[in-house]
Amino acid sequence: MRFVITLLAALLAVVPSAHAEVPTRWDNIGPNGAGGYLAFAKNLVYALPGAGQQVFRSADRGRTWRQGRLFPEMRGAGLAVDPVRPDVVLVAGYQGGGGAGTVLRSVDGGASFSVVLRTPSEVSAVEAGGRMSYAASEEGVYRSSDGLRWQLLPGSPRGADDLHLIGSDLFVAAETVHVFRAGRWTSHAPAADKITSRGDVVVARDFSGGVQLSEDRGRTWRPVKGPWTSSWTLYGGITANGWVQVQTLDGHFISADLGVTWKRTEALRTVDVYTEIGSFPDQPDWQWVYGSGGVYATSDHEHFKRVGVPGAHVLSLAVSGRSLLAGTMQGSYRTDLPVASQEWDFDGRAPAAIGNRIGALAARDGVVLRGRNGYRGSQDTIFVERSLDDGRTWVTTAEMPGNTRSLVFDPGLGTRVYLGAYLINAFYVSLDGGLSFLQRVHAGLRGIKTIAADPGGIWLADAGGLYRSVDAGVTLKQVLPGRMNSVLVDPRDPRHVVAVGQNSVFVSFDGASFVEVPAVSSEQLSAIAVAPDGTLYLGSISFSGSSKGVLRSVDGGRSWTVFGGPDLERGVEALLVSSDGRTLYAGTVSGSVHRRSLG
């Protein structure tokens, strides 16, 4: 059978849709699967995911979060809020690829930002207080009295890593401790790359040099000693309730008497490496920790409650029973339907940050499979894991070389499962429901993004083209050339196939010949989903600026309109329509899962 590509741009243009209007609101429903730099002011807390491009804000102490707009130009590396004017937020950061730095300023509580300072090197930290704002960079410390006009502070040390205000005194970590007090600079011996304080007690941490403590606001210092032997100090500081905290490769330790006696906690094992600790002014004993797996609240650093942030990178979505599952860069999360909270399941332990990327999910008849991209030694390895309780617990059933973004049950034979792979020119077939897999090697494959199955065979959306197999992958035939990101078979009519390229869509109504819809988007197109009534939804991803998010087609893919929305920002990796057709779920690049009513 010959497959034909026909260009009918005039007929298949991207045109406005006459479809009835539906609600336009997108809600971020979680999961709270991302960490972030923290800033507190009164009852507000702000979080900036590491190397992130937007700020999250909570006005109810972490129960719900509002996601701000994308930053102009840069990625964030530090965060500060004016304690007197809590809607004034500063972000330190860097511009991708050039090494230059930027300070952003918001006056609307982190909803939007504008550039107020550009520097030759990365801005590593910002600080605000006493109606002054400060920024640390390789050139030294910049200062502003109004947040808009900035100048290098005369005499400030080069190579500034961290800033910390204690009253009107400015402490700077720049290899050693420098203090700007009463208009004069003094330098002190302790090596430092991070500084914290409580009252007159100041703690300076150096990653390779340990922890130093001053009880007289930085005038004299002494080394902090404890029951650890490692010289690598992952975290060192003092919290608002007076606990000195030190985390090394040996563990996490707390002292309530300025280092005289120490208590070992299980924090390193439970939530991994600390980046910083903060707290609300009226709750010094209830501390928030930015760890490698998220943000957690604790009163003893033994027991943790996850409190944010809904900024996870979601790669896959599935529904099993009354459970909604999201596969992220740090594991999968599960919540009951209908989703009532941004906090999804949490077992008290942070997910592994390495080798725990859930690239694919599939569910059928009470069985859920997930493809976890990890490592066996130094080799990229797919671990197939199975759940019989809707994603609450998992058992590894198989492992094979590669990475995966696609996992699908055969609609006609429930024991047959297909698993796509990239980094190798192969894919996998299971004949026993995902317990074991056979490898199908094909030289033409360059990396499979999506597999779609119908009663007659399978379609492969591959970096080298669209492929068709009618014998469970034993043989393949290329249908379309060029990079393909996704493919979908209409469950109501298997002859209706939609293939998604980088910027174009290819549509077939006979399962044989395809028509191209060119220039659907200037952004990269991603996942595609279909509603029970046949409406198609298509995700897009922007690598510069805001994304259009989701596109919609009500004519089988012949034409597309923007469906929204501004809350999706950088774009969509996964799409899922509820079985009743009333809800669309979008797994986003940096905003967890968003939900929109379809009426």
Image: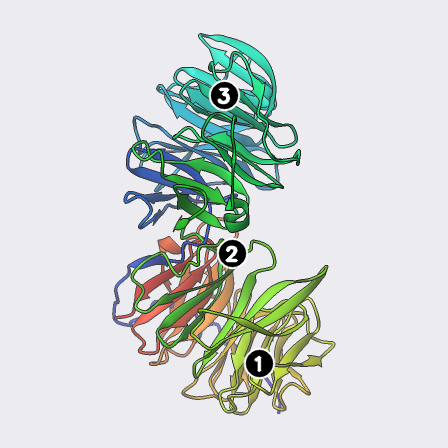
Q: Quadrant of the N terminus?
A: bottom right
Q: In the image, what residue type sits under mark 2?
A: Pro
Report the residue at 57% width, 60% height from top.
356
Q: Residue under circle 1?
A: 434
Report the residue at 31% width, 58% height from top.
341
Quarter-wise, where is residue 190 in the image?
top right
| Alpha-carbon span between mark 2 and mark 1 | 24 Å
| Alpha-carbon span between mark 3 and mark 1 | 58 Å
Residue 381 to residue 114: above or below: below
The reply to whether the C-beta atoms of the residues labelled 3 and 1 are less than 8 Å apart is no
Circle 3 Cα neighbour tier, 10 Å, few/some/many (<14 / 14–19 / ≥20): many
Report the residue at 56% width, 61% height from top.
357
Q: Residue under circle 3?
A: 142
- Please tell me the numbered disc located at residue 351: 2
Check the image and name the residue furthest to the right: 443
Circle 1 Cα neighbour tier, 10 Å, few/some/many (<14 / 14–19 / ≥20): many
* Residue nearer the viewer, 554 or 109: 109
Disc 2 is placed on an element classified as loop
Residue 338: % across, % down: 30, 68
In this orientation, does residue 150 appear?
Answer: no
Disc 1 is placed on an element classified as loop
Residue 165 in the figure: left or right of residue 220: left
Q: In the image, what residue type sits under mark 1?
A: Gly
In this orientation, does residue 80 appear?
Answer: yes
